[in-house]
Image (cartoon, helix red, strand yellow):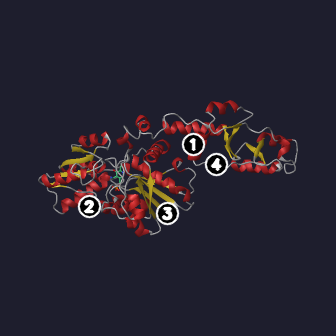
Amino acid sequence: MRYNSILEAIGHTPLIRLHRAARGCLGEVWAKCDYLNPGGSVKDRIGTAMVDEAERKGWLKPGGTLVEGTSGNTGMGLALVAAVRGYKAIFTMADKQSREKVDALKALGAEVIVCPTAVAPEDPRSYHSVVEKLGREIPNAYHPDQYHNPANPEIHYQTTGPEIWEDCEGHLTHFVAGMGTGGTITGVGRYLKERNPDIKIIGADPAGSILYDFFHRGEVIKGEPYKVEGIGEDFFPTTLDFSVIDDVRRVTDKDSFLWARRLARMEGIFAGGSAGTAMAAAAQVLPELTAQDLMVVFIPDTGLRYLSKVYNSEWMRDNRYLESSLPWTAQGILHARADLGQPGELVKAAPADPVATALELMQSHDFSQLPVFDAGQPVGAIFEDDILNLALDGKDLKKVVVREVMGAAFPVVAPSATMDQITAHITRECPAVFVDLGGGQYQILTKYDLLHAISHLVEMRG
Ligand code: PMP
């Protein structure tokens, strides 16, 4: 492919199927990878679109200055246009944005003014107020104002929406995206709804942002600071149109960041925290999908901008998003197993069941053994090998009952049992333990669960 400038390489980003991150989901889940735009984010699309419009309408003259308040990505999109077309660029950013974003803008020749995060938008020190002042005071300045510029949702209506629709060949049923200016979800949502009004448009909002309450209760409840960058607001942007949105899900910083790390480690999709927010919101909906459903999750920006945060385990631990010690207790492993979407229901046989029934159960679950319970208590275990021996001896498996062939019950441990205590029980002959959850409830932990939980925990925390 050959382009006349970097700006022509914007858009037509790939849709990539998710496998491990969507494990257990009946429908298909795909990621719209806008982090693969040349400037590393979705905002390349609006940077060019807003400048094109300003040039067309005479708001921006040759040699002019672009000024914008940005969480970094819009700045990058504008900095690309400024570089190619010879404009000056000055950006204001809130001080919670990562160092990498400030450095990247400077690398492209822009000037960056860092402003405090913990002030109201109307405070003269906020990045919104500072940029407005710059727009008024600098001669031949143009302030695109992505939060109130209709060219922002419009470019998503013109490009992002059609790309997704065409790549899904009409099978799309759900679209999930984070909301900052709301340009992405509004433009894409409007286009998709026009094609098929049944497509569900789902917004992802960080806990602390006002958008979730505004959507569900119609009122603004004061926001709280949160760490995820680029999405959620403490005011309502006019580029956000709730009428095309069916649902808004709330996601904590911790879930956003853990999901971003999972996307990287499970799928090789190396994206920012807001992709994690969208993925965490998607994960809330995944269990509802049927085999006919196809969901697209929007991936706004690259993980390279967050090496000192989301992808820095020390920062994650300092902020309590990662546990500093691994929860290697029986309970911790059961939770890790549940996190992986594995069913918690205990599959068991009764002493009076025919061996053939127990064998069918084992085969349908792909287990090599089954615990045997009588009156709610573990009384034994039955193994595939023993059943095989019976069959080889010519026994009729429908006539022999489990009681006649079962071995001793697996040892019982408390939920607080440590990894060492659990593994002390596990041998070749005894491949599992029971965890006594109290109230007559038991769970089984097999050798396989232990290995799987360890590799999962290491993967998530490394
Ligand atoms: N994620 C990141 C990292 C962003 O910078 C932005 C834009 N602020 C978004 C998501 C949200 O996109 P939009 O403004 O189109 O709602």
- State the image coordinates of residue 73 (x, y, percent, origin top left): 31, 49
- Report whether residue 191 is seen: no
User: Which residue does the image show at 60% across and 36% down from the upper left?
Assistant: 329
User: Which residue does the image show at 65% across and 31% down from the upper left?
Assistant: 421
Mark 3 lies on a secondary structure that is loop
Q: Give amino acid for label 2.
A: Asn
Taking 434 as reference, is 166 above or below it? below
Q: Which residue is mark 3?
A: 171
- Report whether residue 91 is seen: yes
Q: Which residue is mark 4?
A: 344
Mark 2 lies on a secondary structure that is loop
Q: Which residue is mark 2?
A: 149
- State the image coordinates of residue 61 (x, y, percent, origin top left): 14, 56
**What's the CA distance linking mark 2 and mark 4?**
49 Å
**What's the CA distance linking mark 4 and mark 1?**
11 Å
Of badges 2 and 1, nearer the viewer stands 1
Mark 1 lies on a secondary structure that is helix
Taking 126 as reference, is 154 above or below it? below
Q: Along the polypeptide, which appears first: circle 2 or circle 1?
A: 2
Decide if residue 244 is on the left or right side of residue 285. left
- State the image coordinates of residue 162 (x, y, percent, origin top left): 38, 62
Q: Which numbered dot is residue 336?
A: 1
- State the image coordinates of residue 166 (x, y, percent, origin top left): 42, 62
**What's the CA distance linking mark 4 and mark 3?**
32 Å
The quarter holding residue 264 reads: top left
**What's the CA distance linking mark 2 and mark 1?**
45 Å
Q: Give amino acid for label 4.
A: Gly
Of badges 3 and 2, nearer the viewer stands 2
Q: Along the polypeptide, which appears first: circle 3 or circle 2?
A: 2
Q: Which numbered dot is residue 300?
A: none
